[in-house]
């Protein structure tokens, strides 16, 4: 068994297990939200009056 097939098997195990896939998606979306919040930190949403 080579390294590539073990990585593919690991990814398939993540994808086909509903719980693991849900955790992976949640962590990914959370990370994306954190990154978006960091990028928008200095942005003014409402103009000052």
Image (spheres, grey):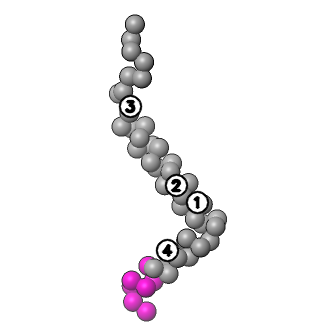
Disc 2 target residue: 27
Res. 6 image quadrant? bottom left
Q: Which residue is mark 1?
A: 23
Q: Label 1: how many residues lie within 10 Å, few (<14), some (14-19) or many (20+)?
A: few
The reply to whether callout 2 and callout 1 are in contact (CB within 8 Å) is yes
**Disc 3 residue crowd, few under 14, some 14–19, many 20+, Cα 10 Å:** few
Q: Position of residue 8 (x, y in %)?
A: 45, 79
Q: CA distance from mark 3 to mark 1?
A: 27 Å
- Report if residue 17 lies within the magenta region: no
Q: Is residue 9 left or right of residue 23?
A: left
How would you classify the magenta stretch by its main secondary structure? helix
Residue under pointer 3: 41
* Callouts 2 and 3 close, C-beta under 8 Å: no
Q: Residue at x 36, y 27 (%)?
A: 43
Q: Which residue lies most toward the top here?
A: 49
Q: Nearer the viewer, residue 45 or 30?
A: 45
Give the CA separation, mark 2 to mark 3: 21 Å
- Vertical placement of residue 25 versus 8, above or below: above
Which residue bears the numbered disc 4? 11
Question: Which element type, helix, strand or loop, lies under badge 4?
Answer: helix
Tag 1 or tag 3, which sits nearer the N-term? 1
Give the residue at x 50% y 81%. Answer: 9
Label 2 element class: helix
Does 5 sit left or right of 15 as displayed? left
| Gap in angstroms between the C-alphas marked 4 and 1 | 13 Å
Q: Does residue 14 appear left or right of residue 1 in this picture?
A: right
């Amino acid at each position: 068994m080579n390294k590539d097939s073990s990585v593919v098997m690991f990814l398939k195990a993540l994808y086909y297990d509903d719980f693991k896939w849900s955790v992976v998606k949640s962590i990914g979306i959370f990370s994306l939200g954190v990154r978006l919040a960091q990028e928008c930190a200095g942005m003014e949403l409402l103009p000052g009056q």
